[in-house]
Amino acid sequence: MTPEGIWLVFVFAFGACVGSFLNVVIYRLPLDKSIVSPPSSCPSCGMRIAFYDNIPVISWILLRGRCRRCRAPISIRYPIIEFLTAVLFVGVYLWFFVWEYRETGLAGEGPLERFFFSGGWLFYVNVMVLAAAFLAASAIDLELWLIPLSLCWVVTAVGLLSSAAAGWIIQVNPEGINAGLFPSVFPNWAGVSFGAAAGLLCSLLALKKGWIPASYAEEQQQGQNPDKKEPEYDDRREIGKEVIFLMPVLIGALAAWGLLRFPSVADGWQKLLQVKPINGFMGALSGYLAGGGIVWATRIIGTLVFGREAMGLGDVHLMGAAGAVIGPGWVLLAFFTAPFFGLLWAFYQWLLRKSRQIPYGPFLSGAVLLVILFHDWILVYLNQFYGLE
């Protein structure tokens, strides 16, 4: 077997193991349980699952989907998530580094060289953390109509850090092609984002100190306790609290915009952005604010217009995390692409004469993945549509 073939087998096996971990996350995170301890056990009889019964996909097949001791059924979701994650890990690697359906602009002759020695691994890790977390978030959202914020925070942190490090690690080809692997941003928008982020920190501090009220506070205290009756709210009033929370963000953005009108401030800011880690970090931060901001604005406007909560704060964090990975322009495109996934679902439901609604998180996740994979094709189409080529 060639080195490339050996590597693909490893990637598939590693992806399956990640899928096995995602099953733990999907089961435990909504229950507020640790995802690292105790070791996996049967939910029915409590028996610890031995390592030979915990081999992704294979163990489920050998056990015929049942616990070895009590014979309780094991959901088919487990091997599906494991296999889907493994295919996703291999497929994304092939898409970027072997088939090159998206131009990476990385130096090197072959896939392995571009991946290991030109920094392609950083881009791959960035994308796969997002894909794995969004897969888990979608599975949880489909079942429980909630998105664990911790999953979004992990993606956001990885997006910010990897974008900051990309300037040191990524090596482009001799032609110096800018393939847009990591977020980029114009200086003025970066400055506005910096001011908005400063305002967001002020809002979070004020919320923690109790200086501003929290929206849907009773629901947050209740958590996911099914024994308690779901509290009733005046949604317009609650969304007004979120408007108050966002006022420092808006003030910070406007203040930064005003300061950048002074030539000395603008020149100093542009020089600061020439430092690669700062430039990369601000690109990811701008994407985070753009992704979260567009969903939050939709949530606020929809709630005020219709008088009931429109979209969830989990969707806000989800798209904020996506923006930290793919940047401001692309996350906005993904947001406006997501409704087409909803229309496809509605058409499918109409054909089967069903009426089951599903949360919006999976549609958003699918749109983000589509934008990442078909980045180059979308870019060519947009350039042709607007007459840029």
Image (spheres, rainbow, N blue to C red):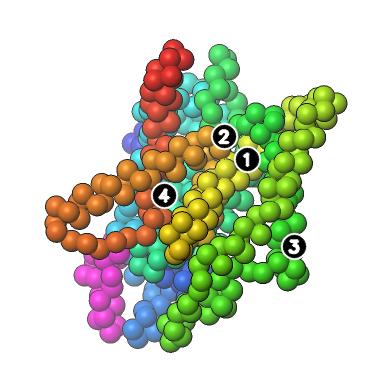
Callout 4 secondary element: helix
Q: Which residues are magenta?
A: 57-77
- Residue 41, image x and y in percent? 40, 77
Tell me the residue that label 1 is attached to. 286
Disc number lying in front (4 or 3): 3
Q: Quadrant of residue 24?
A: bottom left
Judge whether residue 64 is colored magenta: yes
Disc number lying in front (1 or 4): 1
In depth, the one of 9 and 345 nearer the eye is 345
Q: Amino acid at mark 2?
A: Phe
Q: CA distance from mark 3 to mark 2?
A: 30 Å
Please determine whether, in this image, residue 245 is positioned above or below residue 272: below
Residue at x 73% of width, y 47% of height:
251
Q: CA distance from mark 2 to mark 4?
A: 18 Å
Please determine whether, in this image, residue 328 is positioned above or below residue 349: above
Tell me the residue that label 4 is attached to. 365
Tell me the residue that label 3 is attached to. 205
**Of label 3 and label 1, which has the lower sequence position?**
3
Whether label 1 touches label 4, CB < 8 Å:
no
Q: Amino acid at mark 1?
A: Ser
State whether residue 165 appears in this view: no
Q: CA distance from mark 1 to mark 4?
A: 19 Å
Q: Amino acid at mark 4?
A: Ser
**Of label 2 and label 4, which has the lower sequence position?**
2
Q: CA distance from mark 2 to mark 1?
A: 12 Å
**Of label 1 and label 4, which has the lower sequence position?**
1
Callout 3 secondary element: helix
Q: CA distance from mark 4 to mark 3?
A: 30 Å
Callout 1 secondary element: helix
* Circle number at residue 182: 2
Residue at x 51% of width, y 71% of height:
234
